[in-house]
Image: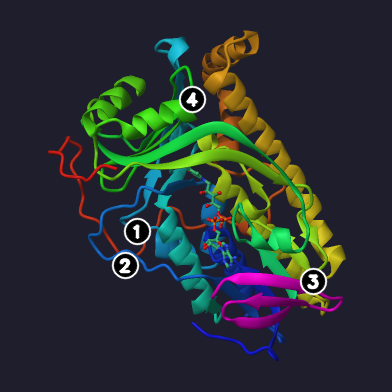
């Protein structure tokens, strides 16, 4: 941890050391480390997260990381820090709709010649892993919050609770309510889904079989994501009123309804963490860049969690921005030049808009709709399941390996390798344990 003085000039100030900002900083730091003139990169984050102690229970906030994300994280040495006993690769996805009876769409990694379809990891571990990788490469973490920005021709002055900084490029990675976005006057379109996601970890009667289960129970969507200790993480998105009832229900009532809505896929379910809730909205910044400023991750776009793409899109932003900035810096160009930032914006905005539209279509037609298009979409699940060719296209999407990828996402990582452990959780048997967890 360090501070900088007002006189000190940075090349890049990344505001927000979440999974996306931390990764962007690590990519910039690593790429320029051995150059004749390495970039001076700092991350501003209010408080540094600590890695969980060995044996600490798994967090309920997890993300499904795609193969593209795995490769990006591996390229800066963060994957080995993250991919331990606390992370769970999943080999299958099973998607089904309540109206489609027993017909399910099943994706199997083996069919695509892949070791897995992705990895479920705690958000906290991703964040710790990227910041550790950034610091290991010589980057500096500043504990503080952004207060304001003053944009000038040659640099940006940042006022923060840790003092003032000047940088040639400011990267806004400060999440959905980005202060950077507001400070540089970038506007965004946002609207509520009028839905809430309930998140918790549950133990299950039957083993999760390294499978990500996703059911559309008529209204909303319910995902059961396999965790490394044998338990599962639920992400249950439903209208705000139903969510309020489910959050207020007793644990036993909640568990009974959850088992019913999951179609008894894993048998009886028991809460092992508190229930947390997240009101869901979509957001898309009209522009991803302004003079000497670029937005990445949730600061630029927020999508519905039903497809588990938020972090994955953000890590692709981070890798794309780092690629164009380092290519320019290696040529001796100004890393904050508008020409360079515009390249990043054109690249990522089109990719993200496409994904956001696809996710919204899933939400509209599979999770909530009842008209002819919804009926068609439900039948489409069975139809896709019968076509190996189309399934392969979907698997490539799920792995994050389609579209115009940054170089870091194209280089295969050592997926099969089991890295040394830093933090672990004791294995949990798949059976339903007696209830001890506190319930919100
Ligand atoms: C219920 C739910 C389930 C999800 N599941 C998945 C999934 O399976 N897969 C997936 O890919 N995505 C998923 N997502 C989305 C994912 O969580 C987000 O897209 C991701 O966290 C965005 O990362 P980020 O680094 O851009 O922003 P954030 O994680 O919001 O990080 C922003 C960082 O900026 C810091 N910050 C904020 N303001 C300031 C300031 N003024 N000064 C300095 N620092 C600041 C914050 O402290 C924070 O560390 C899910 C989201 C929800 C709600």
According to the image, what is the colour scheme of the structure?
rainbow
Question: Which residue is drawn at the image coordinates 47% and 57% (left, top)?
Answer: 414
Find residue 336 and name its label: 3
Which numbered disc flags the more N-terminal residue, 4 or 3? Answer: 4
Q: CA distance from mark 1 to mark 3?
A: 37 Å
**Which residue is under mark 1?**
84
Instruction: Give the secondary structure at mark 4.
Output: loop
Binning the other alpha carbons within 10 Å of mark 1 as few (below 14), some (14 to 19) or many (20 upward) gives: some
Question: Nearer the viewer's eye, disc 2 or disc 3?
Answer: 3
Q: Nearer the viewer, residue 412 or 200?
A: 200
List the residue tagged with mark 2: 422
- Calculate the distance from the C-alpha at mark 2 to the C-alpha at mark 4: 37 Å
Residue drawn at x 35%, y 30% as measured from the top left:
246
Q: Earlier in the sequence, mark 2 or mark 4?
A: 4
> Local crowd at mark 2 within 10 Å, few (<14), some, or many (≥20)?
some
Q: Which mark is residue 420?
A: none
Where residue 210 appears, as percent x and y from the top left, is 34, 38
Instruction: Establish whether ligand 1 lies closer than 8 Å to the Cβ of label 1.
Output: no
| Mark positioned earlier in the residue sequence (1 or 2) | 1
The answer to whether residue 34 is visible is no
Of the two numbered discs 1 and 3 on the same chain, state the one appearing first in sequence.
1
SS category of the residue bearing label 2: loop
> For residue 419, what is the image quadrant?
bottom left
Question: Is residue 122 rendered to the left or right of residue 256?
Answer: right
Give the residues drawn in magenta, as a range. 144-167
Q: Where in the figure is residue 418, as x and y percent of width and height?
A: 36, 58
Q: Is residue 212 above or below residue 285?
A: above
Mark 3 neighbour density, 10 Å: few (under 14) some (14–19) many (20 or more): many
Residue at image coords 54%, 36%: 307
Where does label 4 land, which residue? Answer: 220
1 and 2 marks in contact (CB < 8 Å): yes
Q: Nearer the viewer, residue 396 or 366?
A: 366
């Amino acid at each position: 941890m360090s501070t900088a003085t007002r006189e000190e000039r940075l090349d890049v100030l990344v505001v927000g050391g979440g999974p996306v900002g931390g990764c962007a900083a690590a990519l910039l730091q690593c790429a320029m480390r051995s150059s004749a003139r390495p970039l001076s990169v700092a991350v501003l984050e209010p408080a540094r997260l600590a890695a969980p102690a060995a044996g600490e229970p798994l967090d309920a906030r997890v993300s499904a990381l795609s193969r593209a994300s795995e490769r990006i994280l591996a390229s800066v040495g963060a994957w080995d820090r993250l991919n331990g006993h606390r992370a769970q690769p999943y080999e299958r996805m099973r998607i089904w709709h309540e109206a489609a009876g027993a017909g399910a769409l099943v994706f199997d990694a083996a069919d695509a010649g892949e070791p897995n379809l992705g990895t479920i990891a705690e958000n906290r571990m991703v964040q710790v892993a990227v910041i550790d990788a950034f610091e290991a490469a010589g980057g500096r973490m500043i504990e503080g919050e952004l207060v304001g920005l003053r944009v000038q021709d040659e640099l940006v002055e940042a006022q923060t609770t840790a003092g003032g900084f000047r940088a040639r490029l400011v990267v806004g990675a400060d999440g959905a309510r980005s202060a950077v976005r507001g400070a540089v006057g970038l506007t965004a379109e946002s609207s509520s889904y009028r839905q809430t996601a309930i998140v918790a970890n549950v133990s299950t009667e039957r083993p999760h079989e390294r499978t990500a289960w996703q059911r559309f129970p008529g209204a909303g969507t319910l995902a059961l994501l396999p965790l490394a200790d044998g338990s599962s993480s639920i992400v249950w998105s439903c209208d705000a009123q139903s969510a309020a009832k489910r959050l207020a229900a007793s644990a036993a009532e909640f568990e009974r309804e959850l088992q019913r809505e999951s179609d008894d896929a894993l048998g009886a379910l028991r809460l092992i963490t508190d229930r947390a809730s997240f009101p869901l909205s979509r957001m898309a910044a009209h522009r991803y860049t302004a003079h000497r400023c670029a937005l990445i991750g949730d600061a630029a776009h927020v999508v519905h969690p039903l497809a588990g793409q938020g972090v994955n899109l953000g890590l692709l932003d981070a890798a794309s921005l780092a690629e164009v900035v380092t290519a320019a810096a290696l040529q001796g160009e100004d890393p904050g030049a508008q020409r360079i930032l515009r390249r990043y914006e054109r690249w990522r905005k089109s990719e993200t808009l496409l994904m956001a539209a696809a996710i919204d279509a899933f939400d509209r037609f599979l999770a909530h709709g009842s008209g002819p298009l919804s009926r068609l979409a439900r039948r489409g699940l069975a139809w896709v399941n019968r076509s190996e060719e189309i399934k392969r296209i979907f698997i490539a999407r799920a792995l994050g390996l389609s579209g115009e990828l940054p170089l870091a996402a194209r280089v295969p990582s050592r997926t099969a390798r089991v890295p040394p452990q830093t933090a672990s959780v004791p294995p949990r048997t798949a059976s339903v344990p007696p209830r001890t967890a506190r319930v919100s």
